[in-house]
Amino acid sequence: MDTFLYTFFVLAYIILIIWTFKSSQKELTYRSFLYLVIIGLLYDNLILALGRFIGTGDLLAMLNLGRYWIHALVTPTLVLFSYGVLKLTGIDWVKSNIVRWLSVFVAILLSMIEITMGVMQLKLKPVWDNDVLQYVSTSSSNHPHI
């Protein structure tokens, strides 16, 4: 059943990315970082949907490792997307260079923290959960990803 849901999410993200590309302005802004997040979610759900068909092995392990790297590198760009949305409000303090560079610094810092505390210490093992085959972390820390 979960394979069906992940496949549905993949199709939904494909539709969403096509729709946003067609309806958005063609210039790149801080709000454009949302495209990276959508593509990351599409990849994440695609690997989860295909895991049972690929099967246990090095290929699926590598593809799942890519999921962790995408989470570490792309998810923090939501800080930059949020900055872009805040700029639309016209609030004076958001227009300052300090806020812009602070948002860039926070996004980079979050990525570095996730890479050093999560991805670099990652050891993966295959797990079947609700008919979905994926590689999950075997590390002893049970804290959620930053």
Image (spheres, grey):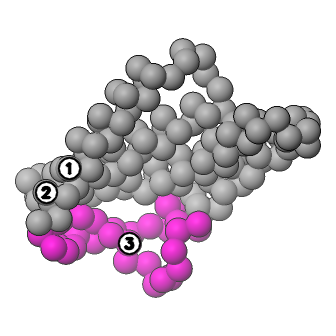
Cα separation, mark 1 vs mark 3, equals 25 Å
Q: Is residue 24 above or below residue 68?
A: above
The residue most toward the top is 26
The three-letter code of the residue at mark 3 reads: Ser
Q: Which amino acid type is shown beneath numbered disc 1? A: Phe
Q: Element type at marker 3?
A: strand
- Residue 142 painted magenta: yes
- Image coords of residue 125 (percent x, y): 28, 71
**Image quadrant assignment for residue 21:** top left
Give the labeled residue for mark 2. 4
Q: How many marks?
A: 3
Q: Nearer the viewer, mark 1 or mark 3?
A: 1
Distance (Cα) linking label 3 and label 2: 24 Å
Q: Amino acid at mark 2?
A: Phe
SS class of the residue under badge 2?
helix
Q: What residue is drawn where x is 67% and y is 45%?
A: 82
Image vertical order of residue 102 relative to residue 6, above or below:
above
Secondary structure of the residue carrying tag 1 is helix
Disc 1: which residue: 8
Answer yes or no: is residue 126 visible. Answer: yes
Tell me, for residue 137, which label it has, or none.
3
For image coordinates 35% across by 27% down, the residue present is: 18
Would you say the residues marked 1 and 2 are in contact, meaning their CB atoms lie under 8 Å apart? Answer: yes
Q: Between disc 3 and disc 2, whose residue precedes?
A: 2
Please tell me which residue lies in front, 6 or 60: 6
Q: Taking 86 as reference, is 53 above or below it?
A: below
Q: Residue at x 51, y 22 (%)?
A: 24
Image location of residue 19, percent across then percent down:
37, 28
Q: Residue at x 53, y 68 (%)?
A: 145
- Report the Cα–Cα distance between label 1 and label 2: 6 Å
Give the residues in magenta.
117-146
